[in-house]
Amino acid sequence: MASPEQRDEVEMLALMLLIRRFEERASQQYQAQKIGGFCHLYIGQEAVVAGAVAATRHDDYLITAYRDHAHALARGTSADACMAELFGKATGCSRGLGGSMHYFDKTNHMYGGHAIVGAHVPLAAGMAFAAKYRKEDRVTLCFFGDGAINQGSFHEALNLAGLFKLPVIFICENNFFAMGTSVKRSTSLEQIADRAEGYDMPSEIIDGMNFREVRDKLAEIVASIRKDPHPAFVEARTYRYRGHSMSDPASYRTKEELEKYRLEDPITRLRAQLTREGKLTNEQFDELDKKAKEQALASVKFAEQSPEPPIDELYDFTFVQGDGPGESGNLLEPAESQAGRAKKPARSPRRLASRSASTNGEEE
Amino acid sequence: MREITYRQALNEALAEEIERDPNVFLMGEEVAEYNGAYKVSQGLLDRFGPTRIIDTPISENGFAGLGIGAAMVGLRPIVEFMTFSFSLVAFDQIVNNAPNMLTMSGGQFNIPITFRGPNGPAHQLGATHSHATECLYANVPGLKICTPATPRDAKGLLKTAVRDNNPVLVLETELFYSHKGLVEPPEQELLIPLGQAEIKREGKDVTIVCYAQTLPMALTAAEQLARDKIDAEVLDLRSIKPLDLPAVLNSVSKTHRVVIAEQDRPFCGLGAEISFRIQSEIFDELDAPVLRVAQEEVPMPYNETLEKAVLPNAEKIIAAVKKICV
């Protein structure tokens, strides 16, 4: 496993391009009604997850909210599996049972994809608790939006993490809007990061549009946590270019504001940094982008051609079988074994009164 | 066999499972230094230390979620609620996260967690502290629920719950912690499968289906009914989910009459489900309508007389039985 410092920046730029091109395709397929339910796009925020992944190991735990496509891709889930999940296909990263908001990939240590705002923050504390319990030096990365910080579950989890000194980084992807409600209209503090002080937790405000800053700041925090487990809080200031979900025209913010952030685009920025330093030519960038577009397009084809999850597996994932008495898939299936029952001879049903005028509805 | 209390039986189950598997730990309010609000975890901190027996702040949603997260990565938490009335603060974690994870992840993440603690009305605790929660949780696919009513069942079911790879709620009966009963000696492993009812008294004239608090009521009712030459069979469900439907159908096919004695409220309740199953599976076996005895449909009053009026009891069960055994 390469240490974080050695993660190639060009490779991370390619990842950010893949995330963007994948989501552009997803958006198109959503509009073509190939994708159901809700679909929340991450476009504009790519540097946050890319920087975090570049600063950590593959076996560190990662968990996030419902804007989760990028987090799976960053962890190494294939674009094919991600697109197939949006299409609800059996080849999806959650077998088509989770959908856009519930991506999971155990092999790549991606622990979801959680769609109740703030409800996964205690889960992150639990994963970090397990790492500490087993004396592992894994760090848990817990992503959430600025909308999560006013939920009770968020506060309870941060208190527990602070109290038990759990190795977890709470990463608030502050894109300034919880759906259509701006941070100013939702939060009593000027700075979200100040919440951390109440839990005796170190915090940082970082530029979430700058890959290098995210990576370097997180690398410092991760090193400190691995040495001696503790929680930390990061407010990554970023911006989503699209609406909250596909149905949101984002009329609550101005064109000028959006344009201001587009000038700081994380992909353009890393590209410029690398080009300036002679690490990337225009041709190389075009090649990376072409590859990302091809992967995204191929994922659509893969999803289209993939099979639906079989209906006869409907009950297979309600309970896990084995290693315990009393196992049963469908707990409400009609009883099969009724042997030995003292059976009364079946009597014929009484006729409906209105249909048996001759007997005046009397019992036979 | 030796006689121990319901509380001791649970304590033995916890100790044996924590001893057996290093991934098992107990977490909850006052479970460690205070030795448990109801002393179920008495002595466990001394024996296993603070990494295995963990006090939490009053933060049910937080620590229930923490347990689920730990279970996602392979630990097997036992999370105690001081009472299941307080589990309602953690309802989102118990209903949305624990049972949904396996499906949402396409089978990748099972949640081997046990939620346990006292459940059901106790004595004059008022509306907020008197909830029976079994029907609320029984409506959720992906949860298993058991309701032990005796020390032996408490030990055997809790041990099985901890070993199950799915979320299991062990709803203990708050009023029974000091009840005594015969239980196998510790050196004899006691595991009672989830989803197995038990006939606690055999009879041939009428079946009284019961569980948790209604078991002693049903047994008392059966004794009194015997004086009136009505021979009642008392069937203790022990588990709500999986439900041992074959046991219910077998008993009713024998007696042809049934009263369902429920600890919870009646509307959309367990008795409604069981009656439906009986009529759809063995309609012809019934010689009388299925009757139910449950709580009255009101928030629990504090006043002792009114509380008694709300709760099921032996007299109400007897009255129901007599109504259909004419």
Image (cartoon, coloured by chain):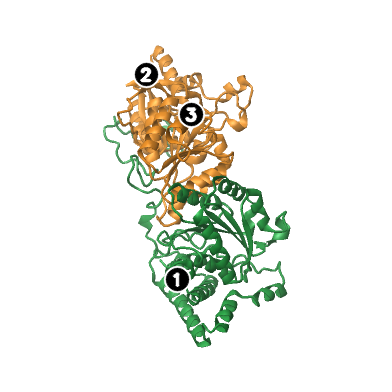
- The residue furthest bottom is A283
Contact check, label 2 and label 3, Cβ < 8 Å: no
| Residue A332: percent from left, percent from top | 40, 43
Depth check, front residue: B296 or A351: B296
Residue B231: numbered disc = 2
Question: Which of disc 3 and disc 2 is earlier in sequence?
Answer: 2
- Rendered hue of chain A is green
Tell me the amino acid under the disc marked 1.
Answer: Ala
User: Which label sits in the foreground, 3 or 1?
Assistant: 1
| Residue A346: percent from left, percent from top | 31, 34
Tell me the amino acid under the disc marked 2.
Answer: Asp
| Neighbour tally class for label 3: few under 14, some 14-19, many 20 plus, Cα within 10 Å | many
Task: Read off the chain for label 1.
Answer: A
Tell me the amino acid under the disc marked 3.
Answer: Arg
Depth check, front residue: A299 or B287: A299
Determine the residue positioned at 43% across, 60% down: A59
Q: Secondary structure at mark 2?
A: loop
Q: Which chain is orange?
A: B
Check disc 3 and report the residue beneath it. Answer: B292
* Residue at mark 2 to residue at mark 1: CA–CA distance: 67 Å
User: Which label sits in the foreground, 2 or 1?
Assistant: 1
Is residue A98 visible in this depiction of the protein?
yes
Task: Read off the chain for label 3.
Answer: B
How many numbered circles does the render carry? Answer: 3
